[in-house]
Image: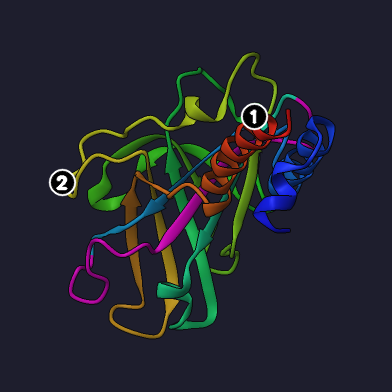
Amino acid sequence: MHLQQLTCLSRRQATAIAAGFFALLTHGAAGAASVSYYLDQSNTEGTWPDGVPYVRVDVFDSLAYAGDIEFLVTPLASLTVSAGTNFGIQAFGFNSNFTRTGANIIDPTGWSAGSGNLDGFGSYEVREAGNGSNRQNPLAFRITGITGDTPLDYAVAGSGGAQGTYYFATHVAGMTVGPGSAYFGGNAVVPVPAAVWLLGSALGALGWLRRHAR
């Protein structure tokens, strides 16, 4: 559409175009608050140096279970490139602003939750763990039965870590390089998707179109 045509649009047409663009950008994202972080610190820097995203942690309002909070912990290409036949997450630690019991955590089959240490990344109020024959890739679990919690209530730093203090830490095993396993921690915020910046441009375009459609 040429600039001359844009300036001839009616206010209703301009609004409809921008609204359609808005719907396209936000399709599938509405209705669920979420936070996402990279675990980019390693306890085995010789094989997996610090500063590389190794694992992504997504914490979000559940759409399938109203009122629950879901976790999705996903090893990234920097680890999966060397994945062996029994590759996956064996333990994951996090904290929260709420008191919970085991009944509030819905684990994968064969996994259990308790407090514990994750090597040099310190102690965590909740340590999700399985055994070597039940590693998860990705790891998915949810928090249920806690009133008023949000994803940000689970982005709380651990304590006592010689490697640093971070929101999350995990043990990943089954790699075919180096020692074959390592602990990773971090709280590096995942960058905002480009679509969000485009959304801002769309809203600005809507204002321009409405001014020139009068």
Q: In this view, does 143 lie to the left or right of 97?
A: right
Tell me if mark 2 has few (under 14), some (14-19) or many (20+) residues whose alpha carbon lies within 10 angstroms of its own: few
Which residue is located at x 24 percent, y 76 percent?
A: 47
Q: Is residue 85 magenta?
A: no
Q: Is residue 105 shown to the viewer in this render?
A: no
Tell me which amino acid carries mark 2.
Ala
Which residue is located at x 76 percent, y 38 percent?
A: 14
Q: Is residue 52 magenta?
A: yes
Tell me if mark 1 has few (under 14), some (14-19) or many (20+) residues whose alpha carbon lies within 10 angstroms of its own: few
Which residue is located at x 43 percent, y 50 percent?
A: 191
Return the x and y of residue 127 as percentages of the image width and height. 45, 42
Is 16 drawn above or below residue 214 in the view shown? below
Mainly helix, strand or loop, the magenta region? loop
Which residue is located at x 74 percent, y 51 percent?
A: 5
Question: Secondary structure beneath disc 2?
Answer: loop
Question: Secondary structure beneath disc 1?
Answer: helix
Q: Are marks 1 and 2 in contact (CB under 8 Å)?
A: no
Which numbered circle lies on residue 211?
1
Nearer-the-camera pick, 79 or 130 = 79
Tell me which amino acid carries mark 1.
Arg
Q: Is residue 44 shown to the viewer in this render?
A: yes
Which numbered circle lies on residue 63?
none
Which quarter of the rendered picture does the N terminus lie within? bottom right
Q: Is residue 8 left or right of residue 173?
A: right
Return the x and y of residue 142 as percentages of the image width and height. 65, 38
Is 14 drawn above or below residue 6 in the view shown? above
Badge 2 is on which residue?
A: 162
Q: Residue placed farthest to the top in the image?
A: 147
Return the x and y of residue 150 as percentages of the image width and height. 57, 24
Q: Given this view, does label 1 or label 2 mark the residue nearer the observer? A: 1
Residue range of the region highlighted in magenta in the rendering: 44-66
